[in-house]
Image: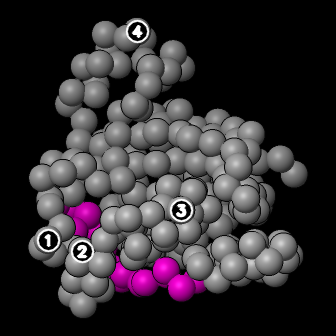
Amino acid sequence: MKPPLRQIRAVHTETTIRVYQAYPPEIGDAALRAGRFVAPFKRERMTWIKPSFLWMAYRCGWGAKPGQERVLAIDITRDGFDWALANSALSHFHSDVHADEKAWKAHMRSSPVRIQWDPERNLHLGPLGHRSIQIGLSGEAVGKYVDDWTVHITDVTADMRAVHSEVVAGDLERARSLLPDERPYALSPELTTAIGATEPSTSSTTAAR
């Protein structure tokens, strides 16, 4: 079944949802040791979290891009994730969400979170026809992410490179079997509208691979 155009798909439990980030070793290793983000991580900068493993692979070049050699899976509370969505503004004007561009710009100025929908990626990191959500945290949202929401941080660099190795070898079935099980993430009607999702993420559609 074809996924909806804009739908959140992620590894999640009843209490947590997994997002990904990639950092240089000095930031990634410090976070792994502490179990949360600490210096040299900078709270004053916007930080983007991504629920899609393959979109993270696209962004960091399978963990090979300079400054993105440590690929981290961060399990955060669903309450925190939903707070981020509820306090977000879309990066681009969406007529179904805002009355006009003036209202959209005012909303952006007052919101600590940005939402962006970018094409999901396949195993070759080419674009697919449906979208993956990227969530940019700034200001108070970064503090909440670091201090309140983070439950566990895992180094998944080796996992990502293992998938890439199978893709390079041409064994896409094996590569696909190594991907995390990203399932639709249920949203309330209010959050669905606020972030411009296509429909409530309640179907049983599996992640595009």
Give the mark, 1 or 4, whose residue is nearer the N terminus: 1
* Residue 134: percent from left, percent from top: 46, 48
The three-letter code of the residue at mark 4 reads Asp
Quadrant location of residue 125? Answer: bottom right
Relative horizontal placement of residue 18, taking residue 141 as reference (left or right): right
> Helix, strand or loop at disc 1?
loop
- Mark 2 to mark 1 CA distance (whole Å): 6 Å
Residue density around tag 4, few if under 14, some if 14–19, many if 20 or more, within 10 Å: few
Residue at 83% over, 47% down? 2
- Mark 1 to mark 4 CA distance (whole Å): 40 Å
Residue density around tag 3, few if under 14, some if 14–19, many if 20 or more, within 10 Å: some
Give the mark, 3 or 1, whose residue is nearer the N terminus: 1
- Mark 3 to mark 4 CA distance (whole Å): 37 Å
2 or 3: mark nearer the eye: 3
Which segment did they paint magenta?
A: 143-159
Q: Identify residue for label 3.
A: 61
Give the mark, 4 or 2, whose residue is nearer the N terminus: 2
